[in-house]
Amino acid sequence: MEPLDKLEAHFKRLSHFQHLAAICGWDQATMMPDGGNNARADAMAELALYCHQQMTKPELGDWFADVDEKSRHLNATQKASVAEMKREWQQASVLPDTLVKAKSLAGAKCEHAWRQQRQDNDWDGFAKNLKEVVALAREEAHIRADQKLCAPYDALLDLYEPGMTAERIDEVFGALKHWLPETIQAVVDKQAQQPVITPKGPFPQAQQKALGEHVMKQLGFSFEYGRLDISTHPFCGGVPTDVRITTRYDEQDFTSALMGVIHETGHARYEQGLPKDLAGLPVGQARSMGVHESQSLFFEMQLARSAPFATLICQQAKQAFNRQDEPAFQVENLHRVLTQVSPGYIRVDADEVTYPAHIMLRYDIERDLISGKMEVDHIPERWDTAMQQYLGLSTAGNYKNGCMQDIHWTDGSFGYFPTYTLGALYAAQLMQAMRQQLDVDGIIASGNLSPIFDWLSQHIWQRASTTSTDNLLRDATGETLNPAYFREYIQGRYL
């Protein structure tokens, strides 16, 4: 076999084990009984170790060297494929097996205990486990930083958003901090003058699920290659040919689960839309977590909370819950419900105007945790101070709705949080470019959203990881990341 053929065969084989790990992770979060956690954690740790060992086999270095010698004979896609395989190989090779296994075990222990600890508001119990996770994350960050010759936090950030740095995020978030708080207050003041009727429950879970599945189909989700389930924390997992969406239901508020389902459907459409001929290879995967989040936020915010889409949702919700004559289910009112801005404690329930404040808060904390400027014991106070600064809310003593509400730190996913707001910025920029080429509102009103999905497929989904995020944005919109479009979008929609 040629060196490139050997590499691609090896990475495709490795992808099969990663497939199994993804489904095991989904099962752990949705179906697995509590008593199975220890055995599952051990099994997943062994699987993670095996995948790591396969990713770092000594002969891979020789194969990459052989491919480099013949690189002039490769086409553009093959060169991109080699670059992505080499990036994953280098990222894996730098970590010792013992650290990989320790991280998996500590993360599984922390995440599983967190489920009950959050309900019990047990910060002390959670902090004990989190300290171990943070210690291992710092160890990883320093190892990666030494290899990449960069700051420790930048080394972790590169795992989720290749090419991004804390310096660039500080610049972007610094601009947000300048205008966002006053914009939040201006929107809240404006909406206080606009009456809104909150739809009253109960909204039975079965009817909510049926509504969610109907909207998923309208958004092009293929149930032949995916499914919808329930978990404590909504997520999209699995693999492109078996995408697993989860949500959680509130029988007093159908919009929460519905918008969550639409959000995760954006992730799922990206996965289902990736190029089939590159399946199983790193180059065939989503470009970054920020780009991934841009698709979920494009679906949830740019599309689903628009006035034309509110009309579609209104008709479907009336039928689902038999509420045809209620004032709360009139289109104008339902659109106001879907675009209501209200500072709150919970990130996943936040509106799109206040959401960046939740992310900036977490980013500042995790950046300083990894650098050693702060410790786990300082998180609650730092969290409370930032919440008061950004949203005028206090979380003193309220850990479950404060610093214990998220799942991402439990498994050491530091560097992940900023990609949420980067995704919002990317989404606004993509919509601005799309509107220059398509009658977006007219397409939504027609109920046939295929032209929108075709545009996304051409510019984002089918390109997978064949180019950088900067090039992806430049080719789709004419420029690299420009946060001004997000400000224009927020102020245009809400003010």
Image: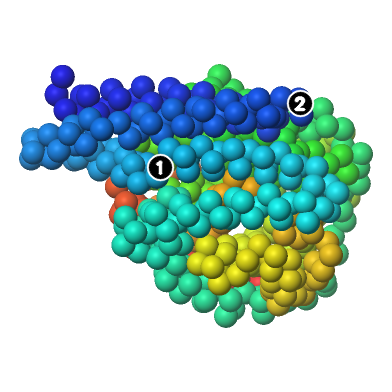
Q: Secondary structure at mark 1?
A: loop
Choose mark 1 or mark 2, whichever is in front.
Answer: 1
Quarter of the picture holding the N terminus: top left
Depth order, front residue of 95/452: 95
The residue lying at 57 percent from left, 80 percent from top is 178
Image position of 367 with respect to 231: above or below: below
The residue lying at 28 percent from left, 22 percent from top is 9
Depth order, front residue of 419/203: 419
Amino acid under label 1? Pro
Query: Percent x, y for residue 293?
Result: 53, 49
Query: Percent x, y for residue 186?
Result: 71, 77
The colour scheme applied to this rendered structure is: rainbow
What residue would you read off at disc 1? 96
Q: Dot 1: few (<14), some (14–19), or many (≥20) neighbours within 10 Å?
A: some
What's the CA distance linking mark 1 and mark 2? 30 Å
The residue lying at 54 percent from left, 32 percent from top is 45
What residue would you read off at disc 2? 35
